[in-house]
Image (cartoon, rainbow, N blue to C red):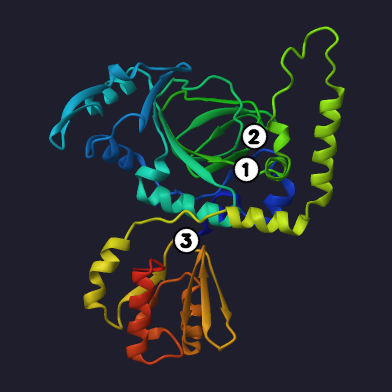
Amino acid sequence: MEAPGGSAFQRCLGDFEDFAQKYWGREPLHRSTGDSFADVFSLDAVDELITSTTPRRPELRLVREGKTLDPASYASAIRLGGRQVDDAIDPEKVIDAIAEGATLVLQSLHRTCAPVGEFAAALEAEMSHPVQVNAYLTPAGSRGLSTHADGHDVLVVQLHGEKRWEVDGLGEFTAVPGDTIYIPAHSQHQAWTESGSSLHLTVGILRVTYRAAVERVLRAKVPRLDDPLPLGYTHVGTSLDHGFEGALEEAGAALLEADPLEMGRQEVSRRRPRLLARRRLTSLIRLSDLGLEDRVQLRPGISTTLRLDDEGRVRMTISDSVLTLPLSARPALETLLLGLPVAVGELPGIDPESQLVLVRRLVTEGLLILH
């Protein structure tokens, strides 16, 4: 997702290199962006989600003073698709609970709200670390969650109203619309409203760590580490020395033999882009009427590379699949990989008929969408 203020990451956290060197995984940051983020989420979007659709648990929950409310107090049984479901959210009950001081938590919003999904996909593409997104709507004079620390990094995006925060390393401050807050994993923090209501997004950044990468090597190379300690190992006279010596010897050998370059390649290959289905169906349906004036764009979350094969053709690699295309298509492909919308008739290096053929194939393969 691109916006006048730059990429999703730049909109939230500014210069990539500056943030990476000063803050990532180390220090909290409170930043005023001047960006409304209205294209990502808003109060109107909250209203739409809870009143115009049929959300079900656990898509949302209600919290008051650090305690989660009983779902039975805001869920009802309805007929859906010819059968009864017991976990449908009752909008009136949810709104009444908010009026009485409960905080509304919209969970996994990146899966239920398309603009938030695009925002999350763009952040993931830049950071390489997976993310999840919740929204918190807190009425005036309320505190949703008590002081706590998360096991993942947190990025807060303030959308509406003001919220007081206390964060280790930053102290106490007020977040206003357009402010963002970065909180490293395991940092204590709490938030509450005073005179007005507040809406913010919380982006959980599920950091991939060196520890996790090393543990993957050990799991693959030293299966004996999952063997149980001997039965009765706490009994007097039972020795664990020999077992630990063998386990440590094998683990040490495996780590000494590990190739850092190969470990890096493995970690890169483990990451899969967050592909979004939005506009793919309409793009496929519209292919029969595709014209040179239609604009197309690389599908959000797609990561691909180009290279020439031995026969001079272009090989386009997407995750685990490869498309082979004529060399003449390379300028057009390079233009498309910039990620910006472009008219079919403006794709360079090929004639109009080839422009249409190329776009039809890439839309069918799920690489392009019609803008």
Residue, far top? 236
The reply to whether residue 167 is visible in this rendering is yes
Q: Secondary structure at mark 1?
A: loop
Q: Which badge, 2 or 1, comes first in the chain's sequence?
A: 2
Residue nearest the viewer, comparing 213 with 24: 213
Residue nearest the viewer, comparing 144 with 370: 370
Q: Secondary structure at mark 3?
A: strand
Q: Amino acid at mark 1?
A: Arg
**Which corner quadrant of the image does residue 293 belong to?**
bottom left
The reply to whether residue 158 is visible in this rendering is no
**Label ID, residue 207:** 1
Does 311 appear above or below 165?
A: below
Q: Are marks 2 and 1 in contact (CB under 8 Å)?
A: yes
Which residue is disc 3 drawn over? Answer: 2
On-image quarter of the C terminus = bottom left
Residue, far left? 82
